[in-house]
Image (spheres, helix red, strand yellow):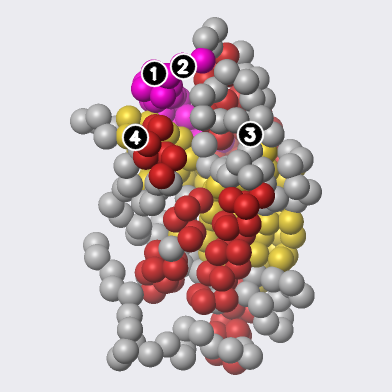
């Protein structure tokens, strides 16, 4: 693996729109991937549940069970589309998340991560929210391993996952220094839970976190009344980083993309000589996060 000292990342704050034909959605995804590649980004991230708008073209609002069945039919087309875009534009894509039924019937919320060579890795949300459980019957996945990329291991935490410090610490212990958090929250309260927790993860693990949220509203999709977000690219809170620990952030509730350059050597310096050295100063003889493969 080649050591990369600078990594350019892009976060897409994707808007919900009426989608009469699936191709309209796929074309919009392609537009942002192309734009991120044109800006020289190495990674681009989309929001959680961004595929739910594919249901808006139905004549009647689907029940949750019928909605999952319909969404499941898009799993392979989405996977193939992301792989083709990643390979064609030489960029790594964190494909938000997609609710789908697995073989055997279990329902999962999955992030498809397409790497530049066209390979696709899937990471399941480990901690579905009470709403996801009760309405969509989504269950949690059982693996939180980092994804190996040419820029080093990356971690993917889908929305609520970011609110569990053990998950980020376990991924950090496996080498991840760059995290992607696709999220979907309906209120400012929910958005701030994700934002505050992601800020905490950057301090605890001396890492970078990219958040990508869904915004707006769309009719005819059950349990998707509205979406509130202010996506951001977050840094540790120390000398050598952005003053407020925010490399860049989007305008709240507006469809847009933000881009930032992340200096990986700054993480090395912070871990070795920072004002605080959270990773070094842990007390594993008193407490630890254990990894279960």
Residue 70 shown in magenta: yes
Mark closer to the chain start, 2 or 4 = 2
Label 3 close to label 1 by CB (< 8 Å) = no
Give SS at disc 3: loop
Give the magenta-colored segment's residue range.
Answer: 61-85
Name the chief secondary structure element in magenta: helix
Q: Quadrant of the C terminus?
A: bottom left
Q: Residues within 10 Å of mark 3 (few under 14, many from 20)?
A: some
Q: Position of residue 208 (x, y in %)?
A: 59, 67
Give SS at disc 1: helix
Q: CA distance from mark 2 to mark 4?
A: 15 Å
Q: Nearer the viewer, residue 32 or 210?
A: 210
In the depicted structure, whether residue 180 falls above or below residue 99: below
Q: Nearer the viewer, residue 5 or 283?
A: 283
Mark closer to the chain start, 1 or 4 = 1
Residue 269 shown in magenta: no
Q: CA distance from mark 2 to mark 1?
A: 6 Å
Report the residue at 28% width, 73% height from top. Answer: 290
Q: Could you say which disc has been placed on residue 66 in the image?
A: 1
Q: Nearer the viewer, residue 3 or 167?
A: 167
Q: Position of residue 26 (x, y in %)?
A: 58, 26
Report the residue at 52% width, 76% height from top. Answer: 204
Give SS at disc 2: loop
The residue that label 2 is drawn on is 62
Mark closer to the chain start, 3 or 2 = 2
Report the residue at 57% width, 25% height from top. Answer: 53
Label 3 close to label 4 by CB (< 8 Å) = no
The residue that label 4 is drawn on is 137
Report the residue at 68% width, 56% height from top. Answer: 232
Q: Could you say which disc has been placed on residue 176 in the image?
A: none
Q: CA distance from mark 3 to mark 1?
A: 20 Å
The residue that label 3 is drawn on is 226
């Amino acid at each position: 693996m080649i050591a990369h000292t600078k990594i350019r990342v892009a976060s897409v704050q994707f808007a919900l729109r009426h989608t009469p034909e699936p191709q309209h959605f796929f074309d919009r995804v392609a537009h942002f991937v192309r734009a991120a590649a044109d800006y020289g980004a190495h990674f681009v991230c989309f929001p959680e549940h961004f595929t739910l708008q594919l249901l808006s073209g139905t004549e009647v609002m689907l029940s949750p069970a019928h909605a999952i069945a319909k969404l499941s039919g898009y799993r392979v087309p989405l996977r193939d589309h992301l792989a083709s875009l990643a390979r064609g534009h030489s960029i790594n894509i964190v494909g938000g998340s997609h609710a789908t039924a697995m073989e055997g019937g279990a329902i999962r919320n999955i992030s498809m991560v397409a790497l530049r060579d066209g390979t696709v890795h899937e990471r399941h949300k480990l901690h579905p929210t009470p709403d996801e459980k009760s309405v969509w019957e989504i269950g949690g996945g059982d693996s939180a391993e980092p994804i190996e990329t040419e820029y080093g291991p990356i971690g993917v935490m889908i929305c609520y996952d970011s609110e569990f410090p053990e998950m980020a610490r376990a991924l950090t212990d496996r080498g991840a220094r760059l995290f992607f958090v696709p999220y979907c929250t309906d209120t400012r309260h929910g958005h701030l839970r994700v934002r505050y927790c992601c800020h905490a993860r950057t301090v605890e693990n001396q890492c970078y976190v990219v958040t990508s949220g869904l915004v707006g509203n769309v009719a005819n999709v059950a349990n998707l009344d509205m979406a509130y977000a202010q996506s951001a690219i977050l840094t540790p809170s120390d000398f050598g980083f952005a003053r407020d620990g925010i490399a860049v952030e989007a305008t709240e509730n507006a469809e847009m993309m933000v881009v930032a350059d992340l200096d990986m050597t700054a993480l090395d310096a912070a871990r070795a000589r920072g004002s605080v050295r959270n990773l070094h100063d842990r007390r594993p003889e008193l407490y630890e996060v254990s990894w279960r493969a």
